[in-house]
Image (cartoon, grey):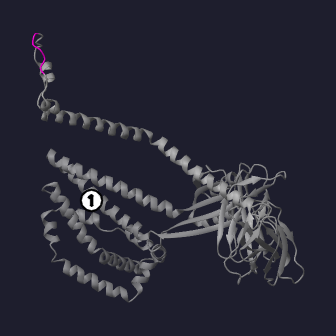
Amino acid sequence: MLTGSPDFLVNQIQMLYSALMKKLPLIVAALLLVTSALACAAASETSFETSESMPQAMMAADSPAAFEVERAVAKEMAEGASMPAQPAAAAFPEAASVESALLPSFDEVQASVASQNRIIVRTVGMGLVVNNVADTVDQVAETAQSLGGWIVSSDRIVIHHGSVSVRVPAQQLDEAVSRIRALGVRVEWESSNSQDVTDEYVDSNSRLRSLRATEEALLALLERATDVEDALEVQRELSRLQAEIESLQGRIKFLQETAAFSLINVEMSLAPRQMSINAGPDQTFSSGQLARFRATFSPPEGIEEFSFTWDFGDGSSADGRGSAPTTEPGQRVTATVTHVYEDDRDSPYIVQLEITGTGPSGIVEGTDSLIATVTRIPTIEVFAGEDRVVKEGDEVEYSGSFTRGEGLWDIQYRWDFSDGSPTVTGAPEEGATRVETRHTFENYRPQPYQVTLTITAQSAAGEVRGTSSFMARVTESQGLVIGNWDLVESAKWAIRALSAIALVIVNIIIWVAIFSPVWLGIIAIAYGLYRLKRYLDRRLLARNRPYAETDLQTVLPSQPDQAPTEETGEQQENR
């Protein structure tokens, strides 16, 4: 009978099981040798059944390597006699029964041989373009059910997109994928993933057998426990072990189901309808010139949002959204996009446009293209003339020149004198490089007039323009002259001088009026200081002179009986 604490007994059982697991390959080989020997001595029927159940074991027994395995087993058993497990078995008589319970049975040997077949978990994903998302989801589910599978999940939240996941038997995977492909208009992408879980499956089964053996040992200990504390300790360990067994069983079941039934993930998008668009006529641009592109299109009913992409053919593109209606019923126009072609060496360029529209009625798309030719545009050099001085009312001739580049036609010129008069336009003679005109400045002004000559011409890249200008200063004409003395001009100068003087006086008055409070304050302060100075002077003078009789009379009581005395000359002088 096993004695000792539950922890000690569990540790002894685990050590015994580890020792047996180390000798498991030799034990399996020994059993194979015994089985092969029995097969040779048995009847033909028994031999046939044995060969059907273990073909690999029979081949191993008939091969020369079997004798090597037998010698290895004998050597291992001889060495195992000296292992410390024997004293443990002698000390615990029931350990032999536990050891026999841990020895692999014939069914386990057969399972070990069968594990050579790999366990593969396959997952397939694909993207389909379909005419109807909802109907295709139902058809995929029906296909899986007809092959013995089921639907895992589906998603149809977005109007024009959806997804579904199904599981089918692994043997029917290729058939299911072939049927699902046929449900779509086209397959946009497809992926397949295979995962070998054989090692995990075998390891999980081995751990499960080990845990179950430990569970049986713990149950035996629980039955023989006489102490409540020991029984509770064994029960806690048994509960933990059973939870681990359940988790491991769930994992093994998952591997079995995923290997037996493959997963197919299908993502679906609605197939767009075609829409008529017009990217515009072919265009010609010059290198460095700003090119403008705009397209028109006619979407069907129920399409509300639009996006477009221009590919300019030189490696650059532009995206945009939105559109605007036109005067034509049912027609819309995209926003204008601009682009600059820097080089003409790769010209012409194929410009492609793609427009996509979405709405309650589905998805539409359309494409169109045009050819953009890039050339080096010729330039026109223009010279209008030098700055000049003209008199008011005089008719003066003006002449300008320009250059004629190759590839130019329909040359036009325009004179603009910036005095409000109509511009002078015309076309020079064939081969001419000079244009002339006459003009009269009717009014004088102090600022000069800007005279501009503009030459325009047409080319393969569009209109070409060149300009040049100069300043024309207009002087006043002479009036009444007497003896080389211009009366009118002198009067004008006199009026101007008087106007300038009057302007100065008015400015002075204005400034004086603005600062009048300051001036009045200054004057008041100066007058106060003046009065204060005079008062101080009088006080000083009065302090330095002797009192006169009249002064004494003002401070002494009056004496009416006393006759007034005459003042001496010195007193009068001091007074």
Q: Position of residue 234 (x, y in %)?
A: 21, 51
Residue under label 1:
214
Name the amino acid type tagged 1.
Thr
Magenta stretch contains residue 460: no
* Picture quadrant where residue 191 is located: bottom right
Q: Would residue 280 be found to the left or right of residue 227 on screen?
A: right
Could you tell me residue 143's position as x and y percent?
A: 66, 57
Q: Position of residue 543 (x, y in %)?
A: 13, 33
Q: Nearer the viewer, residue 127 or 180?
A: 127
Q: Nearer the viewer, residue 359 or 171?
A: 359
Q: Is residue 478 visible?
A: no
Q: Quadrant of residue 272?
A: bottom right
Residue extending furthest toward the bottom: 64
Q: Residue at x 70, y 72 (%)?
A: 312
Q: Is residue 48 above or below residue 483?
A: below
- Find out whether residue 562 is within the magenta segment: yes
Which one is nearer the viewer's eye here, 542 or 40?
542
Helix, strand or loop status at disc 1: helix
Taking depth in this image into account, of 225 and 533 the one nearest to the observer is 533
Residue 560, compared with residue 388, is above or below; it is above
Q: Quadrant of the C terminus?
A: top left
Residue 470 in the image, given as x and y percentages of width and height: 72, 72
Instruction: Please say if 214 is above or below 547.
Output: below
Position of residue 303 in the picture relative to residue 225 (left or right): right
Report the magenta residues as a range: 561-565
Residue drawn at x 14%, y 72% as measured from the top left:
84
Q: Main secondary structure of the magenta part?
A: loop
Residue 469 appears in the figure: yes
Q: How many marks?
A: 1
Q: Is residue 424 left or right of residue 551?
A: right
Q: Residue at x 74, y 80 (%)?
A: 381
